[in-house]
Amino acid sequence: MGELDEQLNDKMGIEIIDWNPDRVVATMPVKGNRQPYGLMHGGANAVLAEAVGSVCAALKSGMQPTVGLELSCTHHRGVREGLVTAVATPLHVGRSTVTVDIVITDESDRRTCTARLTCMVLQSAPGS
């Protein structure tokens, strides 16, 4: 199995549905991403936020490689079923960092999580 066959986004069921540098949108199923009480796991919110925020940062940096420096998530409401949707919008675009605001909502458009991701813009891909 190659490295591209082991992507966390695939394991979590994350699907990016809008690839715009000013607004990146992704969905993720709650099923398979729950904690023991039947609610979506807070770590799943964090994975979704970092996934959509990193894409937004890369697009805003002109497709330079970006890596997360800091992620902050506030969990507002539990979700038991269906899909959640994350919308990432850039807050700051600099030469070496990009900060992105991420709002995650349930299928009734209720905010379930608010996150902020700061990414570092790299000059070359990690490991190269």
Image (tube, grey):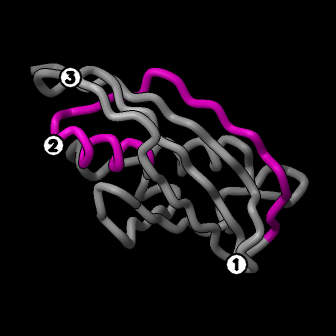
Q: Earlier in the sequence, mark 2 or mark 3?
A: 2
Q: Nearer the viewer, mark 2 or mark 1?
A: 2
The disc labelled 2 sits on which kind of residue? Answer: Gly
**In front of the other: 11 or 95:** 95
Q: Is residue 104 above or below residue 123?
A: below
Magenta residues span: 53-80
Residue 64 drawn in magenta: yes
Looking at the image, residue 11 sits to the left or right of residue 60; the answer is: right
Percent x, y of residue 1: 24, 48
Residue in the image at 22% along x and 38% along y: 61
**Helix, strand or loop at disc 3?**
loop
Looking at the image, residue 78 sits to the left or right of residue 21; the answer is: right
Q: Is residue 14 above or below residue 50?
A: below
Query: Badge 1, how many Cα within 10 Å: few under 14, some, many 20+?
Result: few
Residue in the image at 71% along x and 74% along y: 109
Numbered mark located on residue 2 in the image: none
Q: Which residue is mark 2?
A: 62
Q: Earlier in the sequence, mark 2 or mark 1?
A: 2
The disc labelled 1 sits on which kind of residue? Answer: Glu
Percent x, y of residue 110: 77, 69
Q: Which residue is mark 3?
A: 122
Residues marked 1 and 3 touching at CB (< 8 Å):
no
Q: Which residue is mark 1?
A: 107
Looking at the image, residue 38 sits to the left or right of residue 119; the answer is: right
Residues marked 2 and 3 touching at CB (< 8 Å):
no
The disc labelled 3 sits on which kind of residue? Answer: Leu
> Farthest residue toward the right?
37
Q: Is residue 76 above or below residue 120?
A: below
Query: Badge 2, how many Cα within 10 Å: few under 14, some, many 20+?
Result: few
Q: What is the total number of numbered labels drawn onto the structure image?
A: 3
